Every structure is written in structure tokens, then in C-alpha cells.
Image (cartoon, helix red, strand yellow):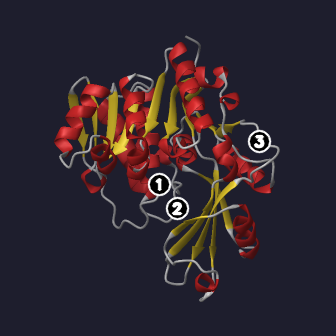
């Protein structure tokens, strides 16, 4: 087994989040439904991007990229694999992610789709209307998975949101193979109940075949996976199927299942939940880094809950506080 280069390497959709306020009437004039996420194609993506004001905020995003950013903020050695295009927004994504300390070296797509973007229009009342173009991020292939990167990571973590494209599925399986070849762990998040509904049989096969070792889910995703409304029954099922399962429970905290044992921790209190976006991504960052560094299940869960509590206290899916300092003040992740 080689020496680790990274604590956590994540694989997923490489999306630039573009956030801008708009004047009254803009949403209606553009034919959008306020407060809804719209999936759009290339022409519409370019049209809307051109209409965004110059003071727009552009941040590297996507679920797994947010997790990598959380690992870096916690003081961990983080890496990300995800596909952008060789275009200006691809440059924005790469510069932003590397600027916060995440290793990112995926070769950009030279021809075809543009860099994925989620254009978030903020109305005066604070409502967020999203237009998402997936573009190049769905062009990830096995050629983007490198044995030296995967084999050098203590844990490789992959997001269910990228399970749609056939070539990305092959890339995930190849990454798990490289991780296991070096006696590393492969982890997978179910991402969303809609993903589970589409790919339930495939997700269960990933888990039961031991292609992935760690499974991340919230209670809705877990119950959807086993098609039950009984959380206890779903927990018993995942305990039989997965080596480790980390389950988030919102205001009730989180639990981990390992060797038939269930460990639960409460949520860290917050004065007000401002924006729940990114809570699961940051929980995964804390839990994964704890596991990568040999922490106990209890400590790993608490680190995850602490990171999640910070990100839900403000708008946006990236931490605003130094999570390494925050975790040290709570006696976590060293």
C-alpha cells in the first residue's frame, strides 16, 4: 500500500454556481417559474448567462466539489475529479477550487459541451430561481480516473448525482477498483431520493457487491432505497449490506452503522437555519476526514455535524468560517 497523498478524493459534477440579484419582473419576463430549478440546454444557458449582471458571484460548485472544499477547510488534504470544458467558466471552476487548497487536475473537455453552470437568480424577496445546465460535467469517463490519484487517497468518495451517464458509471467502478487495489476505501452518497428511485437496483448492487465500502444517505434516501417508511427497518437493512453507513437526520443529528453497531450523535445547535444547501456535503466532509485520520465513529459523526451546522447558518454551500479552527475548539479532527 502506497503512502497517501490525499485524505479524501471526491468525484462528481463540476458545476459553477453563478449567483446574481435581478430586478423586479425579470423572472416573469424570462418565462421562469419563481423559486423552481429549471434544467436548460446550451443555447438557453448562454442566453441567460449573457443577461446576468457583471457583479454576479461565480463559485466552483457541485455536491462532491463542496465536500472536497469542506475537507480542505477542515485542514485535510483534499482532491476533486470532475469534468469542465476548456472555456472561461472552466477556468473559473479550476482557479476557485485550487485557490481554496483542493487538488484539481482533470483534463478539460476540448470540444462539445460547455462547462456546467447553475445560474441562481435572487429576487428582492430572497427567493432563489435556478437554471441548471449540466453540459461538460456529464462527460466524465474512465480516462479521467488515474490510478496514482485514486490509489493515493485514503478514501475516494463519489456522488450519486453523476450516476446518470453510462461512461461516468464506468469511471466510478474503475475508481473503486483502483482504491481497493491499494487497500483504500471507496465511498458513495445516494445524493437524492429521485436518484434512488431511478437507480435503486444499481445502487443496491454497488453496496452488496462491496464495490463501495461506505454509504452516505439522509433518512429519506435510506427509506427510499429499501422502499419502507420504517427508518428502523431501513437501518437494519443497510447494516446487513454496507461495511459503514453514515445517515443524516436533520435536526436530530446523525448516525453511523458499523459491524451491526449503531452510533448516534445530536446535531450542533444553530441560532437559525438560513440555508440548508450543502448540509449533507459538509457533513460528508467532516465524517470522511475523521475516518481517513483514524478517528472514532463518534468523533467522525460529530465533526460532520459540526461542519453541517456551520454551512446551514448562512447562504451558500461553502463554509464561511475556518472549519479547522472551529473543529479544534470542539476537540475534533486533529
Task: From the image, tell me which residue sits under label 3.
Answer: 108
| Residue shown at the point (62%, 35%) measured from the top left | 167
**Does dot 1 land on a helix, a strand or a loop?**
loop
Q: Position of residue 106 (x, y in %)?
A: 71, 36
Front residue of this view, candidates 63 and 47? 47
Front residue of this view, candidates 167 and 215? 167
Q: Real-space Cα distance between discs 2 and 3? A: 26 Å
| Residue shown at the point (61%, 24%) measured from the top left | 5
**Does dot 2 land on a helix, a strand or a loop?**
loop
Q: Quadrant of residue 68?
A: top right
> Is 179 placed above or below 90 here?
above
Task: From the image, tell me which residue sits under label 2.
Answer: 316
What mark, if any, has residue 278 been given in the picture? 1
**Residue at the bottom extreme of this rendering:** 24
| Residue shown at the point (54%, 35%) measured from the top left | 76
Instruction: Evaluate whether residue 152 shows in this view.
Output: no
> In which quadrant is the C terminus drawn?
top left
Q: Real-space Cα distance between discs 1 and 2? A: 7 Å
Q: Position of residue 314 (x, y in %)?
A: 47, 64
Left or right placement of residue 46 versus residue 198 in this view: right
How crowded pointer 1 is (Cα within 10 Å; few <14, some 14-19, many 20+) is rated as: many
> Is 217 placed above or below 187 here?
below
> In which quadrant is the N terminus drawn?
top right
Q: Earlier in the sequence, mark 1 or mark 2?
A: 1
Q: Real-space Cα distance between discs 1 and 3? A: 25 Å
Q: Quadrant of residue 6?
A: top right
Tag nearer the camera, 2 or 3:
3
Amino acid at each position: 500500500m502506497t503512502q497517501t497523498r490525499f485524505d479524501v478524493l471526491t468525484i462528481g459534477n463540476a458545476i459553477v454556481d453563478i449567483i446574481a440579484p435581478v430586478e423586479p419582473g425579470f423572472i416573469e419576463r424570462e418565462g421562469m417559474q419563481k423559486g423552481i430549478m429549471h434544467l436548460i440546454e446550451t443555447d438557453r444557458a448562454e442566453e441567460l448567462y449573457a443577461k446576468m449582471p457583471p457583479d454576479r458571484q461565480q463559485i466552483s460548485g457541485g455536491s462532491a466539489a463542496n465536500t472536497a472544499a469542506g475537507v480542505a477547510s477542515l485542514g485535510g488534504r483534499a482532491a476533486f475529479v470532475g469534468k469542465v470544458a476548456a472555456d472561461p467558466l472552466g477556468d473559473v471552476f479550476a482557479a476557485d477550487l485550487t485557490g481554496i487548497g483542493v487538488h484539481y487536475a482533470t483534463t478539460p473537455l476540448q470540444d462539445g459541451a460547455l462547462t456546467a453552470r447553475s445560474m441562481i437568480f435572487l429576487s428582492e424577496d430572497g427567493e432563489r430561481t435556478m437554471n441548471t445546465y449540466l453540459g461538460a460535467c456529464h462527460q466524465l469517463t474512465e480516462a479521467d480516473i488515474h490510478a496514482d490519484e485514486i490509489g493515493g487517497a485514503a478514501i475516494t468518495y463519489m456522488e450519486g448525482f453523476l450516476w446518470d451517464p453510462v461512461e461516468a458509471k464506468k469511471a466510478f467502478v474503475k475508481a473503486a477498483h483502483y482504491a481497493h487495489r491499494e487497500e483504500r476505501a471507496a465511498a458513495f452518497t445516494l445524493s437524492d431520493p429521485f436518484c434512488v428511485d431511478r437507480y435503486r437496483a444499481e445502487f443496491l448492487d454497488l453496496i452488496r457487491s462491496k464495490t463501495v465500502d461506505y454509504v452516505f444517505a439522509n433518512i429519506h434516501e435510506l427509506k427510499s432505497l429499501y422502499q419502507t417508511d420504517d427508518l428502523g427497518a431501513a437501518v437494519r437493512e443497510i447494516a446487513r449490506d454496507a461495511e459503514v453507513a453514515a445517515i443524516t437526520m436533520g435536526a436530530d443529528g446523525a448516525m453511523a452503522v458499523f459491524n451491526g453497531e449503531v452510533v448516534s450523535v445530536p446535531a450542533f445547535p444553530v441560532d437559525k437555519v438560513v440555508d440548508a444547501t450543502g448540509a449533507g456535503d459538509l457533513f460528508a466532509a467532516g465524517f470522511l476526514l475523521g475516518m481517513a485520520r483514524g478517528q472514532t465513529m463518534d468523533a467522525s459523526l460529530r465533526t460532520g455535524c459540526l461542519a453541517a451546522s456551520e454551512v446551514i447558518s448562512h447562504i451558500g454551500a461553502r463554509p464561511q468560517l475556518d472549519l479547522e479552527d472551529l473543529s479544534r475548539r470542539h476537540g475534533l479532527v486533529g
